[in-house]
Amino acid sequence: MNIRITGTGSSIPVNIESNSNFEKHSFYDTNGNAIDNSNEVIIEKFKAITGIEKRRYINQNQTVIDISIEAAKKAIKDSGVNQEDIDYIIVAHNVGDITSGSNQVDTLPSLASKVKAKLKIKNPDCVAYDILFGCPGWVEGVIQATAFIKSKMAEKCLVLGADTLSRVLDHTDRDSMIYADGAGASMIEVSSQKGGILSHKTVTYTSEGEAEFIFYGPANKGANGTKYIKMHGRKVYEFALNKVPLALQSCLESSGKKIKDVKKIFIHQANLKMDDAIVRRFYKLYKKSMPDDILPMNIQEFGNSSVATVPTLFDLVRKKNYGGHKLEKGDLILFASVGAGMNINAISYII
Ligand SMILES: CC(C)(COP(=O)(O)OP(=O)(O)OC[C@H]1O[C@@H](n2cnc3c(N)ncnc32)[C@H](O)[C@@H]1OP(=O)(O)O)[C@@H](O)C(=O)NCCC(=O)NCCS
């Protein structure tokens, strides 16, 4: 059975927040002490470690639902599927629906039900639900859709990855400059065309305290009980470098393909240097060097839009050859992601 991605769509918010917009922020360390550097130096260092120059935030009058709808409509149109024939709508996110000026997380009803309602889908057999799986949520949604299709529970699944982390930022935290907003959608279907999903791998690590590496916690200073997205960045970095190459290797081995067959790797856009180092280590497992053109990246201009980074990047490359990256029929690509949980997953896929 060929299970393919037959349509993609993305919503990239219009507000461009460049690094210079953070020059007037007051940054504190985890003990609440002001960071002993000028903002220019902090921002310069930030760019050097992450590669991020800009990020996108949604408008004040929008929420994650608006960008999800835009991405979903584009993916449905691109696939040519009648929306009443969709069996599942799966929305992966981290922080739910949050209005401007609040950071109260709202997940009731699910984002998927809100998306279904706004798309005006009438069919009750179209089942809508959310998954909380950290940044690897979209990849996991695609894996779940694959399982539904293989077991004949479904034929067509719409999978979204969407988040508005701009609504849960502690602006006194330097790491808040990493995050961005975005939404990506994809239609997963049984197809008469060859190719599609060959194999997948998912792991969750919790035994060494990993469940607390990325969390919802109070601000560094002036905390009034409000929680924000927080992380132990260095621990995340080291964890990802050690574990993601192994998940990629396991996924590739079960696909029956060779490392030389891999044409592109669509990896979660967390940190430019970190992603580069992960993929170098993956190739090192096969005693090979990383090919120059293997890694499409858009974190420089879009930041880390969490669960949206992989589907939006894939959409951009698939439709617009983003960054000069071109996909040809028959190419083997890998999707991979890492994030809160700590979860890691990977998919091997033939275009
Ligand atoms: C957060 C992160 C950018 C910090 O980078 P790092 O190299 O691990 O940082 P370290 O804590 O080792 O500190 C190195 C230097 O950078 C500075 N630094 C750390 N975080 C910084 C930030 N966000 N902005 C600017 N400077 C920062 C430190 O002060 C230190 O400066 P020094 O050399 O003058 O002492 C990096 O660890 C990272 O990207 N981790 C993964 C993040 C991620 O993927 N999160 C989401 C997953 S979904």
Image (cartoon, rainbow, N blue to C red):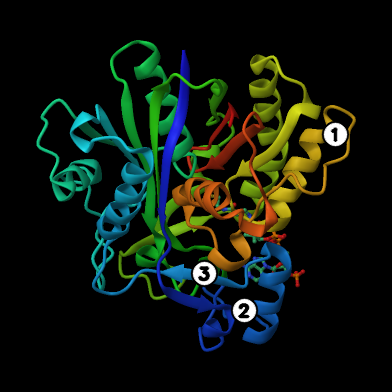
**Mark number, residue 44:** none
Give coordinates of residue 79: x percent, y percent: 37, 38
Of pointers 3 and 2, the one earlier in the residue sequence:
2
Which residue is found at the position 52% from the left and 89% from the top? 24
* Amino acid carrying mark 3 in the image: Arg
Q: Residues within 10 Å of mark 1 (few under 14, many from 20)?
A: few
Q: Which residue is mark 1?
A: 284
Q: Which residue is mark 2?
A: 35
* Amino acid carrying mark 2 in the image: Ile
Res. 30 in view? no
Of pointers 2 and 1, the one earlier in the residue sequence:
2
Specify the quadrant of the image occupied by residue 261.
top right
Res. 283 in view? yes
Label 2 beta carbon less than 8 Å to ligand 1? yes
Q: Secondary structure at mark 2?
A: loop
Q: Which residue is mark 3?
A: 55
